[in-house]
Amino acid sequence: MRVLKIGGGVARRLDLLDLDGDVIVHGASDQVDELCKRLGIEIRRLVSPSGVEFRHTPDEVLEVYLMAAMKLNKEIVAHLQGRGMKAIGVSGMDLGIVRARRKRFVKAVVDGRKFVLRDDNSGIIEEVDSRRIRGLMNLGIPVIAPIAISEENRPLNIDGDRMATEIAVSLSADELVFLSDLPFLVDGRAVDRLSSSEVRGLLMHARGGMRRKLMMAEEALRRGVGMVVIRGLDGETVIV
């Protein structure tokens, strides 16, 4: 069982990617930024106290997020169908596949000072319905957009790497593959292989999305996923 996560950046180059997965999860970061820019909506990128970058998602940005994520979802489905692969595009909200609770607040650090935002529409995943995902697999390759359903039956923004990790864990996947522009680099060189116990000591070399992927890799392995791969367009990092 292989779960693939397609980053929003590499989703522009689907022709270059190996999309051999049983389940596909995708992000939409670049697509959301582009649509916000076209619509004249301000994008605020913030950094959490743990050093992970995230997008502030108030109501108006959530609307754009939903449009951009589902547009990309259908583009990926169309691409797979063009390759002769049956695919079905959904979000985590559909059928209650991914349930989450809205964060009451999020913390960010700006110029060394912490502050709190209470209008963010991001969620914390509480449940993944692996039975329904397996049911979709009988129809084709599930392509899942990073949107969850809240306790109030509202859509929530979910980080794509986090959603892919939770789905991989729920399915007891043998492999979780993050498709990205680059593998993990240290001093400009790709790290071909490392153990989960080495990840924490190497986080200082990672920023932004790569830092998140390493953190998710360590967690996925700890929770029973067999292997994690960060696959760039030229090289990959295998984490066991």
Image (cartoon, rainbow, N blue to C red):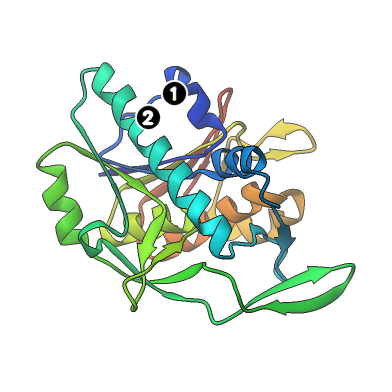
In whole angstroms, how far apart are the C-alphas of marks 1 and 2? 10 Å
Query: Is residue 85 shown above or below 48?
Result: above
The residue labelled by disc 1 is 14
**Residue at (77%, 78%) from the top-left corner?**
115
Residue 95 relative to residue 163: left or right: left
**Residue at (88%, 71%) from the top-left corner?**
112
Give whichever of 210, 152 is nearer the camera: 152
- Residue 35, percent across and down? 58, 40
Q: Quadrant of residue 171?
A: bottom left
Q: Are marks 1 and 2 in contact (CB under 8 Å)?
A: yes
Which label was assigned to residue 147?
A: none
**What is the number of callouts on the image?**
2
Secondary structure type for disc 2: helix
The residue labelled by disc 2 is 75
Query: Is residue 96 shown above or below 79?
Result: below
Q: How crowded is the residue under tag 2: few (<14 C-alpha within 10 Å), some, or many (20+)?
A: some
**Residue at (21%, 18%) from the top-left corner?**
84
Q: Amino acid at mark 2?
A: Glu
Q: Quadrant of residue 81?
A: top left
Q: Give the mark, 1 or 2, whose residue is nearer the N terminus.
A: 1
- Residue 68, percent across and down? 48, 42
